[in-house]
Amino acid sequence: MNNTSVKSPIEPKVGCIARAMEIVGNKWTALILRDLFSGPKRFGELEKSVGSINPRTLSQRLDDLENHGIVTRQSFAEVPPRIEYRLTDKGKDLLPILRQMAAWGTKYYDSNC
């Protein structure tokens, strides 16, 4: 029997959660998404707001999110060049998940949040 056709109490087919985690489960990704929910951000703004992320890692995460249709990258013909990242509708659909993560963190680790 194909394992992906089995139903579970949480996901319609086993593997849906694993697929979502491949996209948003990388370290830093949830924090990048958190910061983009307030509106478009430039690379430097994300670098500061996310925390001690390596610029190369931030660039890789943004590229991955763009490749999956979760963020868009817009270039402006200015000097110096300006690039902004913003969430797509697909990316905005992750808001309830991040809110639940924040609620869970508040419930169990409030003194550290």
Image: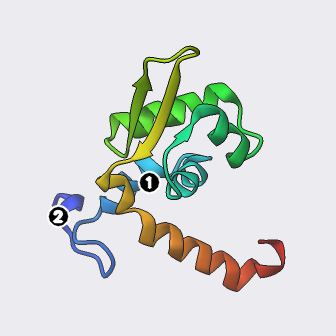
> Eyeballing the image, is 87 above or below 54?
below
Image x and y of residue 24, in percent: 46, 51
Specify the quadrant of the image occupied by residue 111: bottom right
> Eyeballing the image, is 5 above or below 11?
above
Specify the quadrant of the image occupied by residue 46: top right
Task: First in sequence, mark 1 or 2: give its number.
Answer: 2
Within-10-Å neighbours for mark 2: few <14, some 14–19, many 20+? few
Mark 2: secondary structure = helix
Between circles 1 and 2, the one closer to the viewer is 1
Within-10-Å neighbours for mark 1: few <14, some 14–19, many 20+? few
Q: Nearer the viewer, residue 58 or 11?
A: 58
Seen in the image, is 66 located left or right of residue 107? Answer: left
Question: Badges 1 and 2: C-beta atoms under 8 Å apart?
Answer: no
Which residue sits furthest top?
Answer: 79
Query: Mark number for residue 66?
Result: none
Quadrant placement of the N terminus: bottom left
Specify the quadrant of the image occupied by residue 63: top left
Disc 1: which residue: 21
Mark 1: secondary structure = helix
Q: Amino acid at mark 2?
A: Ser
Quadrant placement of the C terminus: bottom right
Seen in the image, is 75 located left or right of residue 43? Answer: left
For the point 29% across and 72% down, which residue is it?
Answer: 11
> Eyeballing the image, is 103 above or below 52?
below
Image x and y of residue 62, in percent: 49, 35
For the point 67% across and 28% down, which residue is it?
Answer: 55
User: What is the distance, in whole Å, between disc 1 and disc 2 at their CAs?
Assistant: 19 Å
Disc 2: which residue: 5
Q: Amino acid at mark 1?
A: Met
Image x and y of residue 4, in percent: 22, 59
Which residue sits furthest right?
Answer: 111
Seen in the image, is 57 located left or right of residue 77? Answer: right
